[in-house]
């Protein structure tokens, strides 16, 4: 048994584990409303909401650590807060308690998840690097002066990849079937991914989403990928007409209809090949006035999640200890 600061630290970590699990469950409920109404808001709001959802278990866990910590600074009378939720044996930690088992299992899961994520990313990165080195891509330039790498590959594809120094690749199979204006639109779209460092942020987003159940994980990733594509499309419309961008999307999608769908969404940003109809719809019907009520409700749900998590952590704590020792 431990007492003092070490016991406090271990107990707070067990609080974080419970809060993390509650955060996962909270997102499963809240995301149903937020994701279904996401397109009613501007891009900046959508980015904020998606990152808030995917990172929710982490900041909820941090909030609960601060909330239950005996060292927190309270600016108001703390009596009500202590009645609302408290951890009554924060100074004592037993290795035979359920807290210890919880921490042990959580540590194993976290290590496994980190190793698996690194392994998957490394495997895909090596495979992509080998492919790109094999194709011997050559430097090329569009008629409007933008540089890209041209790959002698028959498959019609254009994409951006690279974490620290993203690069744009266009296959000869695509270049030969489109005109100069369409190539300019495609490369401008990929330049938007380069500027936003989308390949890097997609990997980070995917890593955070990997802690969710598969259905929620896939939904969050798909929504984020779609959003990055819409934002890149929007950047292109600053130089080209929305209809021209939409037509290019449709033409490229027709060329790519036979391509497999199980590509790497995490580290590569593709032009076309996914969510084409939704992207075209956004191009043809841009949002001029976002839904204020949607934003207010979404922010209210996000704000209440950590408070409810703190209460639920306390309730779970007492329920569990009805059957197990501290």
Image: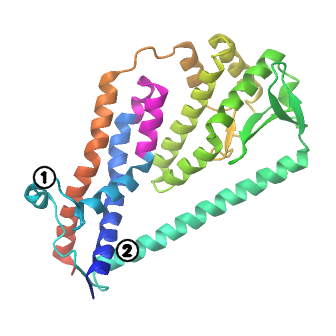
Point 69% across, 22% down: residue: 249
Q: Residue furthest bottom?
A: 1
Which quadrant of the rendered structure holds the N terminus?
bottom left
Mark linked to residue 76:
1
21 up-or-down from 290: above or below: below
Disc 2 + disc 1, Cβ < 8 Å:
no
In the image, 51 versus 18, the foreground residue is 51
- Report how many numbered discs are placed on residues in the image: 2
Q: Is residue 143 magenta?
A: no
Point 45% across, 54% down: residue: 213
From the top left corner, tell me how far across and down residue 165 is, in percent: 73, 45
**Magenta stretch: dominant SS?**
helix
In the image, 258 versus 83, the foreground residue is 83
Task: Work out how far the residue at label 2 is from the one at label 1, CA to CA, in angstroms.
Answer: 32 Å
Q: Quadrant of residue 92?
A: bottom left
Q: Which residue is mark 2?
A: 103
Mark linked to residue 104:
none
86 up-or-down from 202: above or below: below
202 up-or-down from 290: above or below: below
Q: Quadrant of residue 273?
A: top right
Residue 240 visible from this viewpoint? yes
In the image, 148 versus 225, the foreground residue is 148
Tag 1 or tag 2, which sits nearer the N-term?
1
Residue bounds of the magenta highlight: 35-53
Point 53% across, 38% down: residue: 224
For mark 1, give the secondary structure: loop
In the image, 38 versus 78, the foreground residue is 78
Point 42% across, 25% down: residue: 41
Q: Residues within 10 Å of mark 2 (few under 14, many from 20)?
A: some
Q: Quadrant of residue 243?
A: top right
From the top left corner, tell me how far across and down residue 200 is, in percent: 63, 46
From the top left corner, tell me how far across and down residue 220 is, in percent: 49, 42
């Amino acid at each position: 048994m431990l007492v003092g600061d070490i016991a406090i630290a271990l107990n707070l970590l067990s609080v974080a584990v419970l809060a993390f699990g509650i955060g996962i469950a909270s997102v499963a409920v809240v995301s149903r409303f937020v994701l279904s109404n996401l397109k009613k808001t501007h891009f900046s709001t959508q980015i904020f909401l998606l990152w808030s959802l995917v990172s929710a278990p982490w900041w909820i866990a941090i909030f609960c650590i601060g909330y239950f910590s005996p060292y927190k600074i309270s600016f108001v009378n703390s009596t009500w807060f202590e009645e609302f939720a408290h951890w009554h044996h924060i100074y004592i930690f037993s290795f035979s308690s359920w807290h210890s088992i919880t921490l042990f299992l959580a540590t194993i899961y976290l290590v496994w998840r980190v190793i698996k994520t690194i392994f998957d990313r490394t495997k895909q990165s090596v495979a992509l690097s080998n492919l790109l080195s094999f194709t011997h891509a050559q430097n090329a330039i569009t008629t409007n002066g933008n540089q890209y790498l041209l790959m002698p590959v028959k498959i019609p594809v254009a994409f951006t990849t690279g974490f620290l120094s993203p690069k744009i690749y266009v296959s000869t199979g695509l270049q030969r079937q489109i005109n100069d204006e369409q190539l300019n639109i495609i490369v401008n779209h990929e330049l938007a991914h380069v500027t936003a460092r989308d390949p890097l942020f997609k990997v980070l987003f995917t890593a955070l989403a990997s802690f969710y159940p598969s259905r929620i994980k896939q939904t969050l990733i798909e929504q984020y990928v779609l959003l990055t594509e819409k934002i890149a499309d929007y950047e292109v419309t600053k130089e080209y007409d929305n209809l021209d961008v939409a037509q290019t999307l449709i033409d490229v999608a027709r060329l790519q209809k036979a391509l497999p769908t199980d590509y790497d969404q995490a580290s590569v940003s593709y032009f076309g090949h996914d969510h084409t109809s939704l992207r075209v719809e956004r191009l043809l019907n841009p949002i001029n006035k976002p839904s204020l009520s949607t934003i207010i409700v979404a922010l209210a749900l996000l704000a209440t999640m950590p408070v409810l998590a703190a209460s639920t952590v306390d309730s779970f704590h007492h329920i569990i200890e009805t059957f197990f020792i501290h």
